[in-house]
Amino acid sequence: MTRWPDRRILDLFGIELPILQAPMAGASTPEMAIAVGKAGGLAALAAAMLTPQQMAEAIKKIRAASPAPLNVNFFCHTPPADDPQRLASWQARLAPYYAELGLDPAASAPTGGRAPFDDAYCREVERLKPEVVSFHFGLPEQALLERVRATGARIIASATTVAEARFLASHGCDAIIAMGVEAGGHRGNFLTHDMASQIGTFALVPQIADAVSVPVIAAGGISDGRGVAAAFVLGASAVQVGTAYLFSPEATVKPWHREALETAEADATSLTNLFTGRPARGIANRLMREVGPLSPDAPAFPLAGGALAPIRAKTEAAGSGEFSNMWSGQAARLAPRLPAGDLTRKLAGDALERLAKVGG
Amino acid sequence: MTRWPDRRILDLFGIELPILQAPMAGASTPEMAIAVGKAGGLAALAAAMLTPQQMAEAIKKIRAASPAPLNVNFFCHTPPADDPQRLASWQARLAPYYAELGLDPAASAPTGGRAPFDDAYCREVERLKPEVVSFHFGLPEQALLERVRATGARIIASATTVAEARFLASHGCDAIIAMGVEAGGHRGNFLTHDMASQIGTFALVPQIADAVSVPVIAAGGISDGRGVAAAFVLGASAVQVGTAYLFSPEATVKPWHREALETAEADATSLTNLFTGRPARGIANRLMREVGPLSPDAPAFPLAGGALAPIRAKTEAAGSGEFSNMWSGQAARLAPRLPAGDLTRKLAGDALERLAKVGG
């Protein structure tokens, strides 16, 4: 049987298969992490939409079911200052929808609900010691990062450019997630905010692999064994897969989102900042088409969602995702529709088969 | 020695190496085509900026030097109707540059200079019988396409979405170029004009390979042997490479363009419609930064270049590319800087070595 051409990530994390389940705030679950860990991939828990206490409970639940290494993921954005003018522009932009849906424009709009890594989260990390800690939107402040490192955790983070990869490597990351523009959900960009220059996985992975000495984890557009195999050929030592896990029964995906995923062609998605204030890839819907997927009026992350909340509540109650984020990468169609554990094993098995075939 | 895992394109075109030199109007030359053909790749001539007579002379020059198969490439856009209002908006947008450079806004602006495939070109194709005819921006009208087919030429064309690939296959194309968003120069899109949903090579190649029965040629972000090998792993039967050939001495690349290419990081480029009216990937410069790379004011292809011509003439004379198109894909940095023939052989040789290594 063919062996993995690069074992650096397998050895770094102590896992059997070089498949990282993407932490997907709101969609991945402890059940998904348990299944992936049991299958030999790297299990992940997304903390951004959990309180520190909820996160601790989820970690305990996963630990109780599986001894496999666990990756706990945090956002590390800087909470934005109030910007009443931008909020007013945003509310004005959304006013026609409030009118159409019979909503009160003065209704209080709860905000974001995505918290950055801080002392409270860090104390739980110190207590519960996940084997891997991953960061999105850059890295936390140095003192927090040192505390994480002192727990013995392997630290990884996402880069969308070569400059971001060099930054992460020079700040001590043990591996870099090279996040190509195909990827679903929030872009991990932190040194650049120019969406027009974001880079495809095919071009990004080898350029990051050439630029840093730590191993590279490819992400973006990888939903089948061909993609896993191709990532290794380009210089990656593992892959991170998100969208394909959304089809698993372990995912918490709303019905309209699941339906959109089921039929999503490769060009069904765009990068949009409308739902949270930061660009993320999702399936295009009415809001994205009418407002334009990237709007300068959307308040800074994570505030944009506040004024959308009443619109979402009303339309979602009617079974519609036309005003809701439906994150997806560009390769939903390639995904085997399987439970999370079976998917993990199939991605790895098919990749080894593909590598053996092309190398023959 | 490892063999190519898929020989369909090699057999279809009668070539030794599955490397197609991208036809690059204005940058590729008969000398480049001769070198690529002699090395065993598929030589290409870009006709869009040549008159039918100039094209015929270039074909004869290539034929005299090499018996290798030749791909002659045509644009097949519909020449746009006059749109005085959009032209006025465009001239107004550019007026500050005219003022800054001391140019007369009333100076006559010659237009585009990129002609679509028509009867005159077709007669030369019938007379000179290139082995491969390729189209960009869709296909020509049915009668012209039938005439090309009757010459015995293999017909290929670019797709940027799965729907475009299906269209091309159903209209009788012998192979499909899957053009990922990383690719430099003009996007080949023709059924969609939404740049926000364009797809990365990594996601596009396998989805097109799954959707059509004809072989797929991967394009976009491929500048080294890893990329060639990875394209095969994703399901391609060959690759088309453009940017890497711009470094060869056979390319006609202006000094400022070459200098920008030499140092271009992966995120140096954006899709822009400013230079011709159709979106194309080029290295960002002052015009793209100040106007924004995609402007609704730019007149339809190929007219946008007209009002820019006086600005370009003056700034280029001063050695600047800040107002000129500098086409490049996202993987310039990966390119071995070699003559066209050596590059062709190295891409193929390195790819086979990479396939053998990962398959071991």
Image (cartoon, coloured by chain):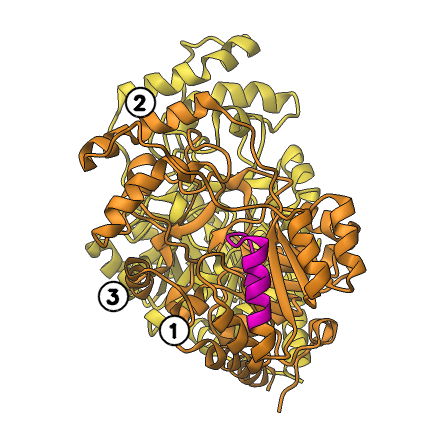
Chain colours: A yellow, B orange
Q: Give the amino acid type for the residue marked by disc 2 in the picture.
A: Arg
- In-front residue for pair A337/A235: A235
- Please check the rendered image and state whether residue A35 is part of the magenta-colored stretch, yes or no: no
Using the image, tell me which numbered label, if any, was put on residue A215: none
Label drawn at residue A170: 3
**Viewer-proximal residue among A36 and A54:** A36
Please rate how many residues cluster around mark 1, counting C-alpha atoms within 10 Å: few if below 14, some from 14 to 19, many from 20: some
Rendering coords of residue B87 (x, y %): 42, 27
Residue A86 image offset from top left, x and y in percent: 31, 22
Residue B283, percent across and down?
A: 35, 53
Q: Is residue B202 above or below residue A114?
A: below
Quarter of the C terminus of chain A within the rendering = bottom right
**Amino acid under disc 3:** Ser
Quick one: SS at disc 3? Answer: helix
Check whether the beta carbons of the residues at disc 2 and disc 1 lie within 8 A of each other: no
Q: Which residues are magenta?
A: B45-61
Q: Residue at left 69%, top 51%?
A: B165
Chain for mark 3? A
Q: Which residue is mark 1?
A: B249
**Sequence-wise, which precedes: disc 2 or disc 3?**
2
Task: In the displayed orientation, state which residue is furthest to the bottom.
Answer: B1
Residue at image position (62%, 22%) is: A317
Q: Which residue is mark 2?
A: A86
